[in-house]
Amino acid sequence: MKSLLANIKIHVDEKVYLKNPESSEKGRQIVEQSILLLDELGLESFTFKKLAEKIGTTEATIYRYFESKHMLLSYLISWYWSWLEYRLVFATNNILAADERLMIAITILSGNIEQDMNFAHVDEVALQRVVVAESAKVYLTKEVDDNNREGFFFSYKRFCKRVADIIREINPAYKFPASLVSTVAETAHYQKFFSLHLPSLTNISDSKEDQLVAFLTELVFKTIS
């Protein structure tokens, strides 16, 4: 099993980068340090100059992989959703009951993130914080339609479709599975953000992760019942 996991690659659509950062040690270093720097500074204060200084390279080197920090953020968000899909597929393998698979999907969306040592250059805990704080900035842009046609959001859409298909198994008559899944995915992020920064807007405590799982589970299963 360990040898199998060691060969797993997270696929990110090639339109989201100029050169695949997984193809070189320098590329993996760019990914690793960009996550930590985005987590520390936020997208607005993050620059390729600061990233280059942090990893001891030139801005030109980073531009060989990503044409802008928006593209770099898009890559990281896509990687995150592909990684969640990998976790979902792995966790639901050989589980026949659709309701149990849906519960696992909700838990993956809302539960605690632990660092996955199969991908040593990615701090998934820090990456989740980046996703929560910055992911909406990837698609709330004037270029969203062009980015969509180019495949920037394929990982996110693929994950949501996989979960929506489970909902269709449970209740084929339910009319809005895609809407429900994307709502739950965004709600998971917003509730985490609110619990940290705008606590009067939520009943979820950041220190009690099971509350978010319970809320989203109730929301989904009562909606589709």
Image (cartoon, rainbow, N blue to C red):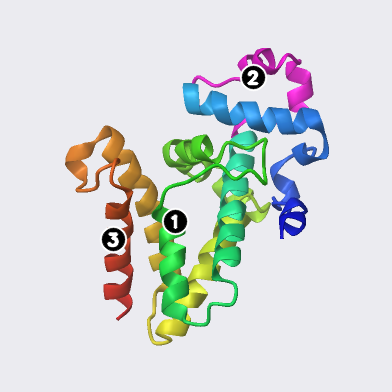
Q: Where is the N terminus found, in terms of image quarters?
A: bottom right
Residue 7 place in picture, x, y as percent: 78, 53
Classed neighbour count for the residue bearing mark 2: other residues with Cα under 10 Å, few (<14), some (14–19), many (≥20): many
How far apart are the two marked residues, 1 and 2, measured between alpha carbons? 29 Å
Q: Mark 1 points at which residue?
A: 109
* Front disc: 1 or 2: 1
Q: Give the range drawn in magenta.
A: 42-70
Q: Mark 2 points at which residue?
A: 51
Mark number, residue 148: none
**Element class at badge 2:** helix
Residue 73 place in picture, x, y as percent: 59, 36
Left or right, 109 with respect to 95, comes to left
Q: In which quarter of the image is residue 110?
A: bottom left
- Residue 59 in magenta? yes
The answer to whether residue 29 is above or below residue 47 is: below
What amino acid does circle 3 point to?
Ala
* Front disc: 3 or 2: 3
- Residue 184 in magenta? no
What amino acid does circle 1 point to?
Leu
How far apart are the two marked residues, 1 and 3, measured between alpha carbons? 12 Å
Whether label 1 touches label 3, CB < 8 Å:
no
Foreground residue among 58 and 204: 204
Q: Quadrant of residue 4?
A: bottom right
**Element class at badge 3:** helix
Residue at position x 69%, y 44% in the image: 16
Task: Give the mark, 3 or 2, whose residue is nearer the N terminus.
Answer: 2
Foreground residue among 96 and 184: 96
Q: Quadrant of residue 74?
A: top right
Q: Mark 3 points at which residue?
A: 214
Q: Where is the C terminus found, in terms of image quarters?
A: bottom left
